[in-house]
Amino acid sequence: MKIGVCTGTFDPVTYGHLDIITRASSLFDHLYICVLHNPEKVPLFSVTERMDLLREETKGLSNVTVDTYSGLAVEYAKLKNAVAMVRGLRAVSDFEFEFKIAAMNRSLDPNVETVFMMTSSEYSFVSSSAVKEVAELGGDVSKWVSPRVAEALLNKFKNRERSR
């Protein structure tokens, strides 16, 4: 059984993420989507919220499981007996960053490959950070996230306003 792992912060999950997840799910017998803790980022959504959104968005993919882990992604891949970690690339600038991580992961565990997938061109500029910024300023994010995620963003920013 060929197992793949797709890790990320997914704060929030975008159509770009779902494009990679859907395409990667067709390459593996099973694909784990793992929400990782990134100490360099302050997420808007909790891990539980991000996992719930991902589960809802991927419920039509029978070979996908949403999970979380708070260690190295390559260690998670090893725990799941994965043959590869899937990484999405939007632009050349992503490649330089991802190449370094892939080399480090290969050094940590040479049995786990890194598979790079180019995001479809209509999502090549979409990032969770940009989506959050547009949503916070009241802009329409419906081209980049599902209605469910757009509503979650709206609610999150409304609740922030109320608490100020």
Image (cartoon, rainbow, N blue to C red):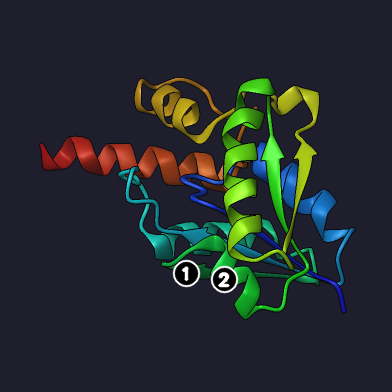
Q: Quadrant of residue 110?
A: bottom right
Residue 26 location, x and y as percent? 89, 58
Q: Quadrant of residue 91?
A: top right
Measuring 35% from the left and 27% from the top, which residue is drawn there? 136
Question: Residue 120 or 152: which is nearer the viewer?
Answer: 120
Question: Residue 163 or 118: which is nearer the viewer?
Answer: 118
Q: Secondary structure at mark 2?
A: helix
Residue 148 location, x and y as percent? 56, 48
Q: Nearer the viewer, mark 2 or mark 1?
A: 2
Q: Which mark is residue 78?
A: none
| Residue on which the image places disc 2 | 76
Measuring 49% from the left and 45% from the top, which residue is drawn there? 12
Say few, some or many: other residues with alpha carbon within 10 Å of mark 1 (under 14 / 14 to 19 / 20 or more). Answer: some
Query: Does the CB distance between marks 2 and 1 fall below 8 Å?
Result: yes
Query: How many numbered circles does the render carry?
Result: 2
Residue 122 location, x and y as percent? 76, 23
- Judge left or right: residue 100 versus residue 41: right
Q: Name the amino acid, label 2.
A: Tyr
Q: Name the amino acid, label 1.
A: Tyr
- Judge left or right: residue 36 versus residue 115: left
Residue 74 location, x and y as percent? 59, 64
| Residue on which the image places disc 1 | 69
| Quarter that holds the C terminus | top left
